[in-house]
Image: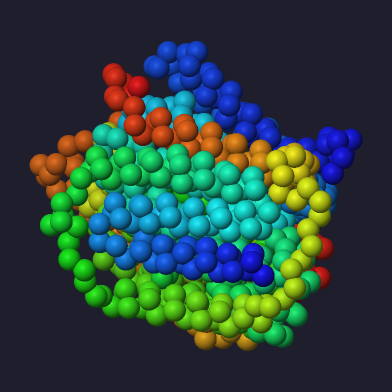
Amino acid sequence: MIQAIFFYIFAASAVVMALVVVSARNPIYSAAALIGCLLSVACIFVLQSAHLLALLQVLVYAGAIMVLVLFVLMLLNLSRDELGRRRITVRRVTGVYLVGALVTLMTIRFTKHLWAPAVSLEPGFGTIEEVGKILYTKYLLPFEMVSLLLLAAIIGAVVLTRKEKGDGR
Amino acid sequence: MGIDSLPAALSVIRPELILAVTALVCLALDLLYKPADKMPCWAVAFFGSLAALASTIASWGTEQEAFSQLVRMDNLSNFFAVIFLMVGLITLCLSDSYVQREGLPAGEYYTLLLISMTGMVFMAQANDLMTVYLGIEIMSIPVYVLVAMMSKSPKSPEAGLKYLLLGGFASAILLFGIALLYGAVGTTQLADILRQAPGALKASDPLFLAGVGLLLVGMGFKVSLVPFHMWTPDAYEGAPTSVTAFMSVAVKAAGFSVLIRVIVLSLSPMAVDWSQIFWWLAVLSMVLGNVVALVQENIKRMLAYSSIAHAGYVLVALTTGTETGIHAALIYLFIYALMNLGAFGVVIAVSREGDQGVEIRDYTGMARKRPLYALAMAVFMFSLAGVPPTAGFIGKFYAFSAAVKAGYVWLAVIGVLMSAVSAYFYLRVLVVMYMKEPEAGAEYSAGPWGAPIGAGVSVSLWVCALSILFLGIWPGWLSHFAQQALQGLTSLL
């Protein structure tokens, strides 16, 4: 019961923060709200006994990545004029309508499970040991694929940002 | 999966392994050799791709799943892998002198090209939505970078940024779709999704339907179907031409490989639903692609819109959701790869340094001074327009007759009408080349269609042109292989 109450608190905070991210005019507010959203999701992970995931969420997303985002935003230092005024366009209205439809459908779908009994977990679920085991056995291939993906991204970042010296080097 | 089954599992992903290792070797070689000496990198990339192609062909006919059923090698995946590797090899031939002329960083260029091909082969072999997504990303990220690589031209980084931002959104939408599907059926395995689909449909589970819809959007973006095509003209125009050639065929074919496996085969129980969506996407792509191509002055933009239209023709075949339809789509993709690569090859041969000379008026009177290029271009344009006896006609014939057989007569009629429209802009290039004199003193007649370009371009032009004519006259063996590619899968329909 107490878990359910905490779940709804964190879930509501995640949703509200996400709404602030997309609706705030000032990108700094958006970034700050995104940190809040990521932290709320991390709390939900804790409630679901996915402790490693929660830890990584805080360290990597709320920590490292958001610091970079804030850094860039502060470097750009956009003024109020550059941000432009809030406009209502056909596209935005359609977008809001579609998102509303999707949310309604999902709400209807999930209310069925609102009071479903909790599923019991295998012992050791969510620990570093178990995640590591599954990562190197069942999901070995995706794990290696991600490393190839990161390599490609690193090469790409280096190619695009280095300064020209002579014949294209 | 135990450790002892590892060699067997690795043999399934052998083409990917060869490509990935080649990419790493290429990257290391780039450090060892002087900047001017790009030959070793090129040779390693070429022979690595050739080895991957040989390994794919050698495993033709085997059917095996590996890595806890995350990947699956069968004839369908092998067919697509052959297309990707063939395209990769021809692109390497087209790139050789182009990369030097435009001063692109060769080592990274070839490395990224190889990594992108690795991702494509993963996509073709994907048996799980997780592998689908990772394959798409491994393919896309190198291509975003390749598009933006020509830092001398202001258009190229802009095109790369646009493609990256929109591609990022499309990936996010695709991932959201995967998450919803997982929420609905509790699995990402394609085989399990196929098993669970009828139940989810019966309950008309909104999660399942929304998930499939979002998946369609993500894949529609990769194959540039209308209305997810906005990035195509800008990205194709701004990218280095050799990269445009690569992405207009290989990325599209890879997108279709996933579309066929995930939507057409694994979600066949809901064919009634998606075939309606496909119908509209196909019609919109064919109409918009062909009509907007009419007014293009830049040949790269024209080919970009034409590629949207060709995605529409492939979708016509897939709308049927039948074995004949998929068979026709496979044939079309193979032929389209050859003819579009050829057309971009001529664009590379004709252009000058800094990607100049890509307006259609630059081709005025080319037949006089460069009769062979003009002849090759004529073959590609006739083929793209679908004129017999070129292979383009065979592709369209299979696609439209599959649609008629499945009862989509109007779709075939619209397709034929739109091919007639497309003849105007394809043949316009021929008229300009053969029937007009270059204007005296005009800027473009001073440089007679570029400096002599490397042997690689000429060779690939002839390979493409001759195979198009060959396939146009003897399409039987391609049809035979496409039939074999579907063996064992048609029971799913």
Identify whether B75 is placed above or below B332: above
Quarter of the image with the N terminus of chain B is top right
Image coordinates for residue A49, horizontal then vertical, percent: 68, 54
Q: Residue at coordinates 89% horizontally, 35% vertically from top-left?
A: B4
Quarter of image, res B181:
bottom right
Q: Residue at coordinates 51% horizontally, 42% vertically from top-left?
A: A60
Residue B134 can be seen in this image: no
Q: Viewed as shown, does residue B187 lie left or right of B27?
A: right
Quarter of the image with the C terminus of chain B is bottom right
Residue A32 can be seen in this image: yes
Identify whether B186 is placed above or below B76: below
Q: Residue at coordinates 60% horizontally, 36% vertically from top-left?
A: A147
Number of marks present in the image shown = 0
Image coordinates for residue B141, horizontal then vertical, percent: 48, 44
Front residue of B445 and B243: B243
Identify whether B451 is placed above or below A65: above
Image coordinates for residue B62, horizontal then vertical, percent: 83, 49
Q: Residue at coordinates 37% horizontally, 30% vertically from top-left?
A: B104
Q: Viewed as shown, does residue B231 lie left or right of B15?
A: left
Q: Viewed as shown, does residue A95 lie left or right of B130?
A: left
